Amino acid sequence: MGIDLKTRLGRYVETAVGGERVRAFVPPPLPPDPPVQMEDLLRRLSAADRALGRLDGITTLLPDKALFLYMYVRKEAVLSSQIEGTQSTLSDLLLFETEAEAGTPIDDVREVSNYVDAMMYGLERMKELPISLRLIREMHERLMKGSRGGTKSPGEFRTSQNWIGGTRPGNAIYVPPPITELKPCLDAFEKFIHADTPSLPLLVKAGLLHVQFESIHPFLDGNGRLGRLLITLFLCAQQALREPLLYLSLFFKQHRADYYRLLQEVRERGTWEAWLEFFLDGVTQTADQAFDSAIRITELFKADRNHIAATGDRAGSVLRLHELFQANPYLTATAATNRSGLTMPTVNSALAELQRLGVVTEITGRKRGRVFCYKAFLDILSEAA
């Protein structure tokens, strides 16, 4: 590379935690010094920009982008939470939200549901409040509400030392900044978000911000989920995306070892370029997958709609239920009746017709409290989730 990376390295501060003396890492403020070497990143950056632009353009083609977003945000919530160790699946979340599954909510599903809430809240709040430490705290409060991390100061930056990996601070893989250094780190982080940085392409800046947030680790819990969420929020704030369609959790989950290794190498060796190569590849791959999913879902809905329309007189009520299944792949007859305004006999007849056409499947085998699933839709959404 031919540049001296020593000035990119942070410093270590000795601090006492639980009766142990440990070395906590304090990252230097962004941008990196010496600056990121863009030459070797240009090809990847160009591919990522193209993929992101193509994905952004899909929003104008979607027949109902609100429905697609509704489902897509939920897929991201599941994947991001799985990285943190929850066992919840997309099906669990959707069944929980339709109250079709007895015995929920379970803790895992509650955590995923909170992620959806935090994401949607952040996007709405950005209309009046820029990305800031205040917004990050507000989102964190919603992320942790009522979940297993609910006792770990939701919405408040930590006032005690945390660590990553290991059974105690002394054998941790990484110890973030001590409390005495937290405020300066966060202030510098916020300043960089809003700094005019014309020499840094937007995606590069997003990649830098993600690592810095993870290195500061400002909360006692929920840092990983919030750090991943901030990538999309930043790109929406900068109008690189009109809608929150880019989520890197699947890529990070599939390459988890590389993800954590590269974060640590930035801290220990200042190798921002290696991290950014990985990050830009993730943007390209993720944007391409999201684009392909959107096209396939749109084609599925159109084909099934045409199939239903060809059935004749009762097509109107059947099409109404098909629309409801696009908003949630799981429905009960009661939920369908409440949401459609149709009578229960009409709903039951329409569900029977959708089953006959092979559009939906009944999944419980029961006579009462039956749950119907739009499996072809769910299968596309659930790929690799």
Image: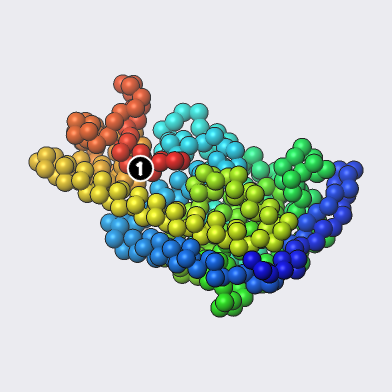
Q: Secondary structure at mark 1?
A: helix
Q: Is residue 3 visible?
A: yes
Is residue 298 rendered to the left or right of residue 151?
left
Residue designated by label 1: 380
Q: Amino acid at mark 1?
A: Ile
Crowdedness near tag 1: few (<14), some (14–19) or many (≥20) residues, C-alpha within 10 Å: some
Residue 200 in which image quadrant: bottom right
Residue at the spot 57% in from the left edge and 77% down from the top edge: 199
For residue 249, above or below residue 35? above
Is residue 363 rendered to the left or right of residue 312?
right
Count of numbered circles in the view: 1
> Measured from the top left, where is residue 230 in percent x and y?
56, 59
For residue 331, above or below residue 316? above
Residue 379 in which image quadrant: top left
> Measured from the top left, where is residue 56 in percent x and y?
39, 63
The residue positioned farthest toward the front in the image shown: 2
Residue at the spot 51% in from the left edge and 32% down from the top edge: 104
Most foreground residue, 257 or 335: 257
Residue at the spot 45% in from the left edge and 67% down from the top edge: 46
Most foreground residue, 89 or 330: 89
Most foreground residue, 41 or 93: 41
The residue positioned farthest toward the left in the image shown: 312
Q: Is residue 127 visible?
A: no
What colouring style does the render use?
Answer: rainbow
> Measured from the top left, where is residue 312 in percent x and y?
9, 41
The quarter of the picture where the N terminus appears is bottom right
For residue 227, above or below residue 146? below
Is residue 342 rendered to the left or right of residue 140?
left
> Measured from the top left, where is residue 203 in percent x and y?
52, 66
Residue at the spot 73% in from the left edge and 56% down from the top edge: 268
